[in-house]
Each structure stands twice: as C-alpha cells, then as structure tokens.
Image (cartoon, rainbow, N blue to C red):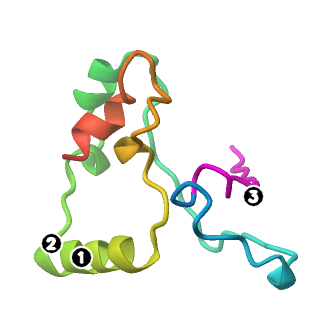
C-alpha cells in the first residue's frame, strides 16, 4: 500500500473566497510522512465498514485530544469542505460530514 498526497493551488475558493493568499515565497511546499501506519476498511459498503471489528472504528478522542483538535481547527484550518456554502455537492455533503457531527 502507498500513500500519495498532492499540494494544489485552491486559494481562489478554498481560502475564504481568496481572502487568504498563498505565500509563494515559501515554496517549494513539501509534505512527508514518518512512521505512518494505516488500518482501514476496503469494502465499498460503508455500513459493512461500520460493522467491522476494527478497533479504530470505535475509538474516540479523550477530552484533552478534543480540546487540542478544536484549537488546531480554530487556529490553523482555513477550509472545511463539510461547512462549504458554495453548494459543491449537488447530492449533499459526503457521508463523513454527518459522521463528524
């Protein structure tokens, strides 16, 4: 299994309608993974994945981790496609948006 990532210019729409500009003087932009271990469900059936015995499906963040996550979201997250008001999803937001609430 491999993990791929891409960095792309979405400042026209994914940065508060272009309010926050990319600082191109900081290029090149690099992403890397260290010690990355993934465990997931390969079924196309979302319900089957939810019923799986994988412990990761039932893990929850403790209070400290939730507080840290909210801080990072508040201070660093610029775009949240689950909160996108541009109607990018004609059939409604992706399933993970409902699960995150």
Q: Is residue 93 left or right of residue 68?
A: right
Name the residue: 35% across, 22% down: 92
Instruction: Measuring from the top left, give residue 80's x and y in whole percent.
Output: 43, 53
Q: Nearer the viewer, mark 3 or mark 2?
A: 3
Q: Is residue 6 left or right of residue 54?
A: right
* Element class at badge 3: loop
Residue 82 visible (yes or no): yes
Q: Main secondary structure of the magenta part?
A: loop
Residue at the disc numbered 1: 65
- Magenta part of the chain: 1-14
Camera-nearest residue between 80 and 45: 80
Question: Pointers 1 and 2 in contact (CB under 8 A)?
Answer: yes
| Among the 4 quarters of the image, the one containing residue 35 | bottom right
Instruction: Measuring from the top left, give residue 34's x and y in whole percent.
Output: 65, 74
Residue 92 against residue 69 in the figure, above or below:
above
Name the residue: 68% across, 43% down: 1
Instruction: Measuring from the top left, give residue 4's x and y in whole percent.
Output: 73, 50
Residue at the disc numbered 2: 62
**Real-space Cα distance between discs 1 and 2?**
5 Å
Q: Is residue 8 left or right of residue 84?
A: right
Instruction: Measuring from the top left, give residue 51's x and y in whole percent.
Output: 22, 27
* Element class at badge 2: loop
Q: Nearer the viewer, mark 1 or mark 3?
A: 3
Residue at the disc numbered 3: 7
Name the residue: 80% across, 73% down: 29
Residue 82 against residue 63 in the figure, above or below:
above
* Element class at badge 1: helix
Dot 3 or dot 2: first in sequence order is: 3
Q: Is the residue marked by circle 3 packed among few (<14), some (14-19), or many (20+) residues within 10 Å?
A: few
**Real-space Cα distance between discs 1 and 3?**
27 Å
């Amino acid at each position: 299994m491999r993990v791929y990532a891409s960095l792309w210019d979405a400042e026209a729409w994914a940065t508060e309608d272009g309010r926050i500009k990319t600082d191109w003087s900081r290029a090149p932009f690099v992403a890397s993974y260290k010690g990355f271990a993934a465990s997931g469900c390969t079924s196309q059936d979302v319900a089957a994945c939810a019923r799986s015995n994988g412990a990761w499906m039932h893990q929850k963040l403790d209070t400290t981790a939730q507080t840290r996550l909210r801080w990072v979201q508040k201070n660093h997250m610029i775009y949240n496609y689950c909160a996108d008001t541009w109607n990018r999803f004609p059939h409604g937001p992706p399933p993970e948006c409902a699960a995150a609430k």
